[in-house]
Amino acid sequence: MKLIKKKILVLLTVIIIIFNNIVTYAEEYEDATQTDVSEEASTEFDDAVVETNAETDVVQDNRDILSLQSKSAILMEASTGRILYEKNADEMLRPASVTKIMTLLLIFEALEDGSMTLDDTVTVSEHAASMGGSQCFFEAGEEQTVNDMIKCIEVASGNDAAVAMAEHIAGSEEAFVAMMNERAKELGMNNTNFANACGLEHEAHLTTARDIALMSRELITKHPEIRNYSTIWMDSIVHRTRRGESQFDLANTNKFLNQYTGATGLKTGYTSQAKYCMSATAERNGIELIAVIMGADTKEIRNSEAGKLLDYGFAKCSIYNDTETLPADMKIPVLNGTKDYVAYEPIIKNQFVLVEQNPEIVIKEIVLYNNLEAPVYQGDIIGVVQYSYDGNVIHEEYIYAAEDVKKLSYMQSLKGLFKKALMIQ
């Protein structure tokens, strides 16, 4: 009996050992299988991450930083002409009524040189009155002042007003268009050809976002009085015809004025082929920017993307203020003058725009003109204050003479030489 019990115990022990080995092997096999699957899954996931990252890098390298939908755009800082952003900026496209910026520039230049005044009378021709598109409905023979014609061009985008002014200045629209193209060349608008004064469709009437920015800058910096017109929201003129007088209301075509804080103009445009275009100007805290949009599918896209450009620009720009006056003991010598030195006008304040530049590393240097020779007259430039950034001059302010220094006469020169000779002895 005892022998049987021992055999049973031995048998049970053997069975338990075998069972444990089977379980252990099964667990080890299951662990090994799970590990292989996990590593394979991990490898697939890592590959997926690599592929995703690679795809993201490509997208980031190729995408437009502002993701604009418009066909062409540019952003310019007005005081320096520095370009902050561009997209297809040199593609020649139809500008529609943005053309009128050049027409307005030539008008203000004619006012500046005195060849006409704001009160001069402009007579509307049959040709001018026949213009379609946006217009102020002038009749042939109707008379308006230059001042009211400018309002009609800038506020209501009147094609008839633009052509009437072109004829008033140059004698014919064709002659005025030649002036427009000549002025464009002078401004470096190398990809522009104007075919009319108002922007109506013409296959040869083409320009670029860059060129529009150039003529916009010339207008707003040289003739800031354009703001007296470009910021008008509502106004009116009086039609005076054979039928009598009637008021004609003007509503600004540039709705962006009321949509963007700091907007100051400048000109919108639309035709079915040009689509929605605009040169938008804005100023905040002494910084003035020009945003040009061409070929937007809707006016909402045009206005939204102009605002996006301007926001981007204002974030990139800052004002540099230098409130230090020129040194009181600075001497500016004059050769052959009745005085040995000339007094200068102290520069109390220099202010200019920095574009993506750190004001802390701007270097200021006073450069006096060497060999300054009499006569020197009050207001003459006798030196310059230069501001440099990273080795490049980014701004200059002139130093002006505060007095006249006459040239020594022949006798005065002899007396001076005689005194020097006595001092040597």
Image (tube, rainbow, N blue to C red):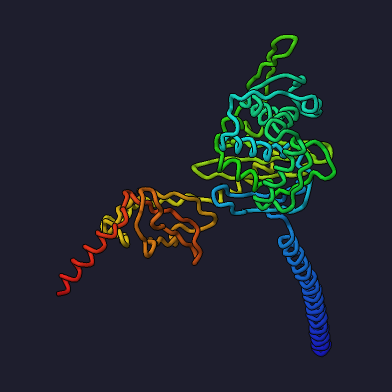
Q: Does residue 406 appear left or right of residue 422 in this picture?
A: right
User: Where 176 sits versus 400, above or below?
Assistant: above
Question: Depth check: 263 or 326 in front?
Answer: 326
Extreme residue in the front direction: 411
User: Where 270 sits versus 349, above or below?
Assistant: above
The percent position of residue 173, horizontal first and vertical second, equals 76, 35
Q: Residue at x 32, y 52 (%)?
A: 344
Q: Is residue 88 visible?
A: no
Q: Does residue 363 appear left or right of residue 172 in this picture?
A: left
Question: Depth check: 219 or 244 in front?
Answer: 244
Question: Depth check: 419 or 388 in front?
Answer: 419
Please identify the quadrant where the C terminus is shown: bottom left
Number of marks in the image? 0
Q: Quadrant of residue 17?
A: bottom right
Please identify the quadrant where the N terminus is shown: bottom right
The percent position of residue 131, horizontal first and vertical second, equals 80, 28
